[in-house]
Image: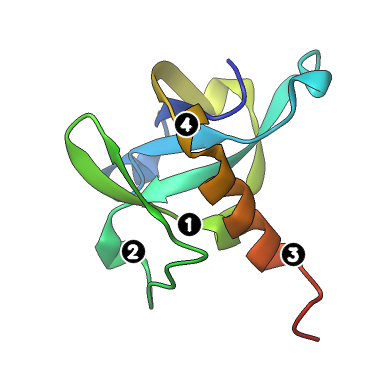
Amino acid sequence: MRQFDVVRNTGRSRTDTPYWVIVQSSAFGDYDRRVAIPLVVESRLPKRQRHVNPAFDVEGRTLYLNALNIASLPMQAFGEVVASLSDQADDIIAAIDWVISRAFD
């Protein structure tokens, strides 16, 4: 599992959150957990903010990064790798930056 891989969600929330994007650096590949951000259906976003919730197409579906729900999960929470968003890494990193930046304090 590599950074920016899209993996199936194996949990109960998979209807609304069908995938996770792995954002953890490969420098921590020996750990039994991964930092990931859910890809959700639009109805799961209270209010879409384009900087924090960029859209991605995965397996023919338009889904939205829910950067506010970044999490560290055990490896067994993830299913198979179905895609890579490495070509859109800048959008993912920018969304994380919007969530954690102190620029607006």
Name which quarter of the figure residue 41 lies in: bottom left
Question: Residues under labels 3 and 1: Cα distance?
Answer: 13 Å
Asked if the residue at tag 2 contacts the one at tag 1, i.e. Cβ–Cβ closer than 8 Å, the answer is yes
Asked if the residue at tag 4 contacts the one at tag 2, i.e. Cβ–Cβ closer than 8 Å, the answer is no
Which sits earlier in the primary sequence, circle 1 or circle 2?
A: 2
Q: Nearer the viewer, residue 65 or 43?
A: 65
- Choose mark 3 or mark 1, whichever is in front: 3
Q: What is the three-letter code of the residue carrying label 3?
A: Ile
Left or right: 45, with 30 as reference point: left
Query: What residue do we see at 44% from left, 61% from top?
Result: 53
Q: Alpha-carbon neighbours of circle 3 within 10 Å: few (<14), some, or many (≥20)?
A: few
Label 3, on which residue? 100
Q: Position of residue 92 (x, y in %)?
A: 55, 47
Label 4, on which residue? 87
Q: What is the three-letter code of the residue carrying label 2?
A: Arg
Question: Residues under labels 1 and 4: Cα distance?
Answer: 18 Å
Q: What is the three-letter code of the residue carrying label 4?
A: Asp
Query: What residue do we see at 66% from left, 66% from top?
Result: 99
Question: Residues under labels 1 and 2: Cα distance?
Answer: 9 Å
Label 1, on which residue? 66
Asked if the residue at tag 4 contacts the one at tag 1, i.e. Cβ–Cβ closer than 8 Å, the answer is no
- Choose mark 4 or mark 3, whichever is in front: 4
Q: Which label number is shown at residue 44?
A: 2
Asked if the residue at tag 1 contacts the one at tag 3, i.e. Cβ–Cβ closer than 8 Å, the answer is no
Which sits earlier in the primary sequence, circle 2 or circle 3?
A: 2
* SS class, disc 1: loop
